[in-house]
């Protein structure tokens, strides 16, 4: 395996940390990296691109032919890495490291790193201690009595952001045409720092969100992509000629303790950046400007979980409404930090 023998002298036992789930990756993992091809790269850091939504570690390492090559290894954004104990000052040029993870599907000299080991024997995992969830959702956070406050996506076992998407079988001819014109490896909206769609925003792992009151309105502030959605509580209709965007225009109402959000005025866009189907190339799931959504936000007080249910309807691109999706969030004491997204190239790193 490439670079597995480079820069010897590090401890070789990483124990259970060598195998960790990729549930916290910010974009779909499987289309870009192959978990069946483990990366094990030792060498000297030449640069660390401390960016969001992804960071990139450049390592000079010797390949299996004895040649020094530059390996570029992606991981979470700098904000998430820093919260989990991997800070930019630890990855200065000249630092000797060993990284383990998964090799890229697109380049023999790129990878996704899960663990970084330093010359003094310290081994850190990008998802925090023992490869578990970020400590952001600490059990010491005061019990919540309503939906307001800061939250963090609760871990989802076997979560996949690029697996089968049954709705791709329910496309109208217009929807099929749109899907055929989308190349996920060039057209993924996150390459342009576009937050993609509300369902993608709600599904962002490892980054907190905050629900606050702002006068008569409610604001959903997500750290991911610096999303700030204003929910207009005193409006009954969407502006007929209002601007359109990937996150649309939202009006809301309370039904008991549940916040109901109706969103329209979407621009045509992407629902799933990557959709995998057996025997077929990777595709994306697109939506038209006719998309509408209904979100229901409620508190499960007994379990201390924010429950978010989303219904989507797009009669132009789909023959039927979407099945209801559901996410849960744990209370968090995290402060939302500026995301300051950096546009990325087709291969990921903006250097290429």
Image (spheres, grey):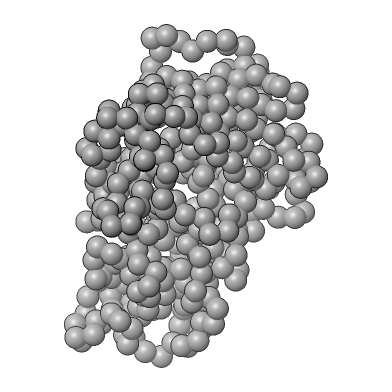
* Residue at 42% in and 44% down: 166
Q: Position of residue 131 (x, y in %)?
A: 56, 68
Q: Nearer the viewer, residue 81 or 96?
A: 81
- In the image, taking residue 207 as reference, residue 110 lies left or right, namely left
Q: Nearer the viewer, residue 8 or 347?
A: 347
| Quarter the C terminus occupies | bottom left
Residue 61 occupies quadrant: bottom left
Relative to 221, does residue 315 appear above or below in the rendering?
Answer: above
Q: Position of residue 36 (x, y in %)?
A: 37, 73
* Residue at 27% in and 35% down: 176
Q: Nearer the viewer, residue 157 or 259?
A: 157
- In the image, taking residue 151 as reference, residue 293 lies left or right, namely left
Q: Residue furthest bottom?
A: 9
- In the image, taking residue 298 as reference, residue 277 lies left or right, namely left
Q: Position of residue 72 (x, y in %)?
A: 30, 66
Q: Position of residue 158 (x, y in %)?
A: 53, 59
* Residue at 55% in and 36% down: 324
- In the image, taking residue 182 as reference, residue 80 lies left or right, namely right
Instruction: Tell me if residue 48 can be seen.
Output: no
């Amino acid at each position: 395996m490439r670079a597995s023998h480079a820069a010897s002298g590090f401890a070789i036992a990483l124990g259970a940390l060598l195998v960790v789930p990729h549930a916290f990756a910010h974009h779909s993992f499987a289309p870009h990296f192959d978990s069946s091809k483990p990366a094990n790269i030792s060498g000297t850091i030449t640069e660390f691109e401390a960016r969001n939504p992804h960071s990139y570690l450049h390592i000079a390492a010797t390949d299996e032919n004895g040649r020094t090559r530059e390996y570029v290894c992606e991981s979470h954004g700098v904000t998430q890495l820093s919260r989990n104990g991997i800070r930019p000052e630890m990855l200065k040029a000249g630092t000797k490291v060993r990284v383990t993870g998964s090799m890229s599907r697109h380049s023999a000299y790129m990878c996704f790193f899960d663990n970084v080991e330093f010359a003094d024997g310290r081994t850190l995992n990008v998802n925090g201690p023992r490869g578990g969830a970020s400590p952001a959702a600490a059990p010491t956070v005061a019990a919540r009595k309503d939906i307001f406050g800061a939250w963090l996506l609760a871990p989802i076992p076997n979560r996949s952001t690029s697996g089968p998407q049954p709705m791709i079988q329910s496309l109208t001819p217009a929807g099929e045409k749109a899907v055929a014109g989308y190349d996920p490896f060039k057209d993924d909206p996150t390459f342009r720092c576009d937050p993609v769609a509300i369902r993608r925003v709600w599904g962002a792992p490892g980054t907190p969100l905050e629900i606050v009151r702002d006068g008569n309105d409610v604001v959903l502030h997500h750290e991911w992509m610096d999303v700030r959605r204003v929910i207009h509580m005193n409006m009954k209709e969407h502006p007929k000629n209002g601007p359109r965007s990937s996150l649309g225009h939202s009006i809301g109402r309370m039904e008991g303790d549940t916040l109901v959000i109706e969103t329209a005025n979407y621009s045509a866009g992407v629902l799933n950046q990557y959709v995998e189907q057996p025997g077929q190339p990777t595709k994306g799931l697109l939506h038209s400007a006719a998309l509408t959504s209904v979100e229901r936000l409620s508190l499960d007080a007994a379990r201390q979980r924010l429950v978010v249910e989303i219904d989507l309807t797009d009669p132009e691109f789909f023959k039927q409404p979407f099945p209801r999706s559901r996410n849960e969030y744990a209370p968090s004491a995290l402060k939302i930090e500026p995301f300051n997204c950096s546009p990325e190239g087709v291969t990921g790193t903006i250097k290429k």
